[in-house]
Image: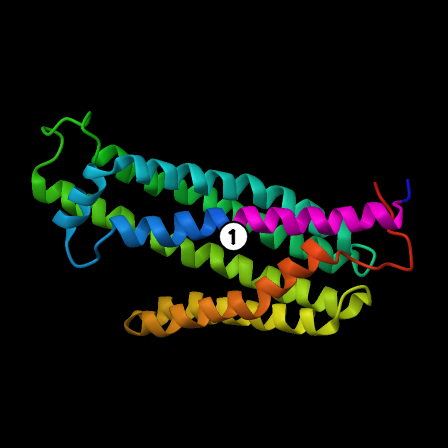
């Protein structure tokens, strides 16, 4: 079965629409929720924040779940969109994004643990106050470390998709270059924060800059322009 030009554009528009879902859910669950509930300087304040608004934490967990599911569809669509350029690179990019999605799903376990430990239904006999605080902060750190791991998969994905865009001829080469630069920025943030945690704020700025420089133009192009293919894209 051969896809028409209109169908190919629909693939691109579909990815763009899913990127909007990722942007909204990611901003909420990865930025707003942690900045509102988690206080890295005080375990007691963190627990108090969560217990006073545990619904927000649960909404953050659900939001990450939506991200996980959305990433699965984006991975498949990315493969079908770019496999005519290079099947190997397209498959590698899809697997890298799937790895990112799997790690995000695994990260839900840490958030779920925080939710359980701070729940009113949790017996106070399970943990003394200081043990509860220590375990909550440990799970928060595990969640943050997990984010660095899935970010490495995502960095690899961005670099490869950037190369595919550059080679494709149906998207501006500058989009490919910017997305590859974004991938490098994510890699710098992930590896840099692991190796030099004292410079975490600096690496955070690199990640934000990477998203603005590379991902937003890619998302808007897919959403509003789609793709222009001269050669048909085969379908399974």
Quadrant where the C terminus is found in the figure? top right
Could you tell me which residue is drawn at 79 percent across and 54 percent down? Answer: 83
State the image coordinates of residue 60 (x, y, percent, origin top left). 38, 42
In the rendered view, does 132 fall on the left or right side of 115? left
In this picture, residue 190 sits left or right of residue 229: left
Image check: 105 left or right of 159?
A: left
Residue 196: % across, % down: 33, 73
Residue 124: percent from left, percent from top: 10, 30
Mark 1: which secondary structure?
helix
Q: Nearer the viewer, residue 164 or 106?
A: 164
Residue situated in front as seen by the camera: 163 or 212: 212
Quarter of the figure that contains the N terminus: top right
**Residue 12 sits inside the magenta stretch:** yes
- State which region is magenta: 3-23
Q: Residue at x 42, y 59 (%)?
A: 148
Is residue 141 among the parts visible in the rendering? no
């Amino acid at each position: 079965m051969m896809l028409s030009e209109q169908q190919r554009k629909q693939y691109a528009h579909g990815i763009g629409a899913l990127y909007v879902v990722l942007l909204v859910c990611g901003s909420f669950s990865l930025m707003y929720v942690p900045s509102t509930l988690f206080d890295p300087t005080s375990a007691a304040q963190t627990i108090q924040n969560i217990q006073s608004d545990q619904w927000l934490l649960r909404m953050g967990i659900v939001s990450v779940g939506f991200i996980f599911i959305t990433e699965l569809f984006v991975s498949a669509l990315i493969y079908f969109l770019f496999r005519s350029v290079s099947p190997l690179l397209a498959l590698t990019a899809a697997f890298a994004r799937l790895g990112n999605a799997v790690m995000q799903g695994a990260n839900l376990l840490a958030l779920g643990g925080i939710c359980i430990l701070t729940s009113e239904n949790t017996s106070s006999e399970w943990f003394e106050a200081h043990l509860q605080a220590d375990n909550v902060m440990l799970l928060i750190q595990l969640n943050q470390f997990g984010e660095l791991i899935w970010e490495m998969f995502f960095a690899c994905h961005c670099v490869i998709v950037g190369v595919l865009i550059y080679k494709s001829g149906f998207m501006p080469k500058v989009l490919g270059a910017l997305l590859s630069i974004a991938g490098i920025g994510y890699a710098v943030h992930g590896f840099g924060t692991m190796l030099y945690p004292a410079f975490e704020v600096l690496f955070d700025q690199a990640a934000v800059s990477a998203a603005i420089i590379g991902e937003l133009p890619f998302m808007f192009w897919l959403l509003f322009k789609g793709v222009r293919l001269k050669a048909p894209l085969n379908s399974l």
